[in-house]
């Protein structure tokens, strides 16, 4: 009887000890704090606070902003800003004090100095930094070079087209009439003006088909003028060439006699005359 009464009491004590040990081993549960709930009602609509998820991010942002306080900041001018306000901004950004303060990496002979002086004044007025000013000049030079190369290429194409048309029209007298026209045009306008004046069709004035034909016709009327005669070069008409060929190939002439000392010379001359006759 006594043994039966004591046993349950021991079992009860053991069970209570196990329960206490189990409760001790269970980890404590922590609760996550929602940062947005900590924001006072009067500031909850601030968009700058919407991205913060925890206090650590908020503190980091605050400390970073505090470091910027007192830094060398540039005020952004509004619509009521004066020229002096803008000048202060340009100067803080690095604009030279005067237009003469701009310096460039290219050499002096690479750009017209008078044009550069005018550009510097405008650049200073607009508040351009030295690097921006140089970039603009380089872009302008590259654009001009590309345009010049394209214009030269087009002028050469027009020159070839003009020569082909004149050869068809003038035939054997092509070189004569072209030289006469150019001599008269050069003495009238000057070589630089003829070579550097570009017309709407892309041709130079001195290579334009209409201009050359006009001066050629005028030169024909002034053929005895020393300006037209120039260096005294002789030109033959088609009939004159045919007549000379006929004389060189007469029966019994050196042209037909292979043993004649002037045979080769006669053959070569006839060949050249026929080439000239065929343009």
Image (cartoon, rainbow, N blue to C red):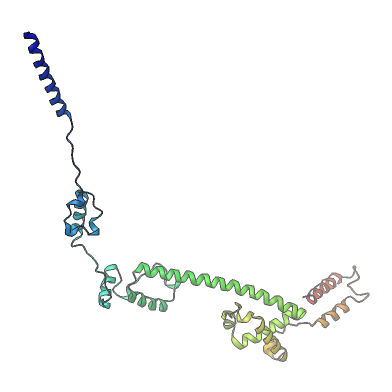
Tell which residue pokes out farthest to the front in this image: 1
Image-based side of 245 in relation to 102, left or right:
right
Quadrant of the image occupied by residue 67: bottom left
Residue 117, image x, y percentages:
38, 77
**Can the viewer see residue 182 in this picture?**
no
**Can the viewer see residue 53 in this picture?**
yes
Residue sitting nearer the eye, 25 or 235:
25
Which residue appears at 87% of the width and 77% of the height?
A: 248
Quadrant of the image occupied by residue 263: bottom right
Quadrant assignment for the C terminus: bottom right
Which residue appears at 12% of the width and 17% of the height?
A: 11
Image-based side of 151 in relation to 9, left or right:
right
Residue 219, image x, y percentages:
70, 88
Residue 247, image x, y percentages:
88, 79
Quadrant of the image occupied by residue 274: bottom right
Residue sitting nearer the eye, 3 or 111:
3
Which residue appears at 18% of the width and 41% of the height?
A: 31
Residue 115, placed above or below residue 17: below
Which residue appears at 33% of the width and 75% of the height?
A: 124
Tell which residue pokes out farthest to the left in this image: 2
Quadrant assignment for the N terminus: top left
Image-based side of 26 in relation to 173, left or right:
left
Residue sitting nearer the eye, 162 or 272:
162
């Amino acid at each position: 009887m006594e043994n039966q009464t004591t046993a349950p009491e021991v079992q009860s004590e053991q069970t209570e000890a196990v329960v206490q040990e189990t409760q001790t081993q269970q980890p404590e549960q922590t609760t996550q704090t929602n940062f947005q709930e900590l924001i006072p009602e009067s500031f909850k609509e601030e968009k700058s606070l919407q991205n913060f998820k925890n206090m650590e991010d908020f503190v980091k942002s605050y400390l970073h902003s505090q470091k910027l306080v007192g830094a060398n900041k540039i005020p952004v001018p509004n619509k009521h800003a004066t020229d002096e306000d803008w000048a202060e901004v340009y100067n803080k950004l690095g604009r030279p004090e005067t237009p003469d303060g701009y310096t460039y990496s290219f050499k002096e002979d690479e750009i017209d100095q008078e044009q550069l002086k005018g550009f510097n004044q405008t650049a200073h007025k607009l508040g351009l930094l030295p690097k921006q000013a140089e970039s603009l000049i380089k872009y302008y030079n590259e654009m001009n070079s590309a345009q010049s190369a394209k214009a030269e290429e087009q002028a050469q194409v027009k020159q070839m087209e003009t020569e082909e048309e004149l050869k068809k029209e003038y035939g054997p007298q092509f070189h004569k009439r072209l030289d006469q026209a150019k001599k008269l045009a050069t003495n009238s306008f000057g070589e630089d003006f003829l070579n550097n004046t570009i017309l709407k069709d892309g041709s130079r004035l001195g290579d334009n088909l209409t201009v050359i034909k006009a001066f050629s016709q005028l030169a024909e009327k002034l053929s005895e003028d020393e300006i037209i005669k120039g260096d005294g070069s002789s030109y033959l008409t088609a009939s004159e060439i045919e007549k000379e060929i006929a004389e060189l190939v007469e029966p019994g002439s050196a042209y037909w006699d292979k043993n004649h000392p002037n045979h080769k010379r006669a053959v070569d001359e006839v060949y050249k005359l026929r080439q000239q006759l065929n343009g």
